[in-house]
Amino acid sequence: MAAIDSTATEKDMSFLDHLEELRWHLIRSTLAVLILGFVAFLMKDFIFDGILFGPKRADFPTYRLLCASAQALGLDSFCFTELPFRIQSRTMSGQFSAHIWTSITAGFIVAFPYVLYETWKFISPGLRLNERKNARGFIFIASILFFLGVLFGYYVVTPLSINFLGSYQVSDQVFNDFDLNSYIGLVRACALSCGLIFELPIVIYFLTKVGLVTPQGLKKYRKFALVIVLILSAIITPPDIASQVIVSIPVLILYELSILIAKRVHKTQEKQA
């Protein structure tokens, strides 16, 4: 009886009550990001020297793997002792500003499961009981996909981009001196964008639930999705076929997985109907 009363109360909430509820979810999520961001702020040496500047070093795991693979094929690609660029800070507050925003970004990445949890607590009361059961494990799966995407962006997309852009020169008279915020922005964009792209199966699941996406539609536009993925891969990677294929393969696998998810959701809805 208590559960019924609680559900009824949730349904009878006014618009302002829902806004108040949303406000507290946002406050708790923001506090989690700030607290973890403060912890990251204190771990400055590990965050910057160990993580952010890792793809700049020749002994980065991705470069070692690619160098060994290239040597096995009789090539010398990705085999170098130092990338030909330096990182500088050209503004008075540049390093402090980079420290602050990097800490907040790190706090968001680590707090992502909790942010999802607060989001789920806000939207779940509006779902039916069977929809809640079907969405069980949403936070765990979405978090795993996000972290896999961040790791893929950091270990694959970031070093490929840094290696190409850092060694690219229009003339021997020009030396690459990159601003600190520009370098950090590239690493952050690669990691976060891949983390969000890897959420594609979750997005497709909910779009299928509300009827905006169908398995037939996903199959019909598969070839267009392939072209879009290849274009995005060409934008965020060096202009060579191998790099584009490396980046595009996981996204295409996620798209095919999304089709399977849409099929299962559609079949479940037909049974219920």
Image: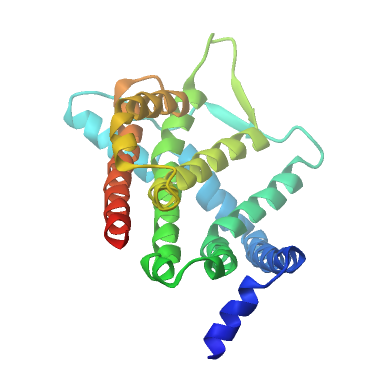
Tally of numbered discs: 0
Choose top left, top right, bottom left or bottom right for residue 5: bottom right
| Lateral position of residue 152 relative to residue 113, left or right | left
Q: Is residue 174 above or below residue 217?
A: above
On-image quarter of the C terminus? bottom left
Residue 216: x %, y % from top left? 29, 37
Q: Which residue is drawn at 27% across and 49% down?
A: 263
Q: Which residue is drawn at 80% across and 42% down?
A: 93
Residue 41: x %, y % from top left? 67, 59
Furthest toward the front, the residue is 273
Residue 138: x %, y % from top left? 42, 63
| Lateral position of residue 43 relative to residue 144, left or right | right
Q: How is the image coloured?
A: rainbow
Q: Which residue is drawn at 28% across and 24% down?
A: 76
Choose top left, top right, bottom left or bottom right for residue 114: bottom right
Q: Residue at x 41, y 23 (%)?
A: 231
Between residue 187 and residue 206, name the one nearer to us.
Answer: 206
Q: Is residue 174 above or below residue 244?
A: above
Q: In this view, does 66 lie above or below 124?
A: above
Between residue 58 and residue 116, name the one nearer to us.
Answer: 116
Choose top left, top right, bottom left or bottom right for residue 122: bottom right
Furthest toward the bottom, the residue is 1
Between residue 227 and residue 59, name the one nearer to us.
Answer: 227
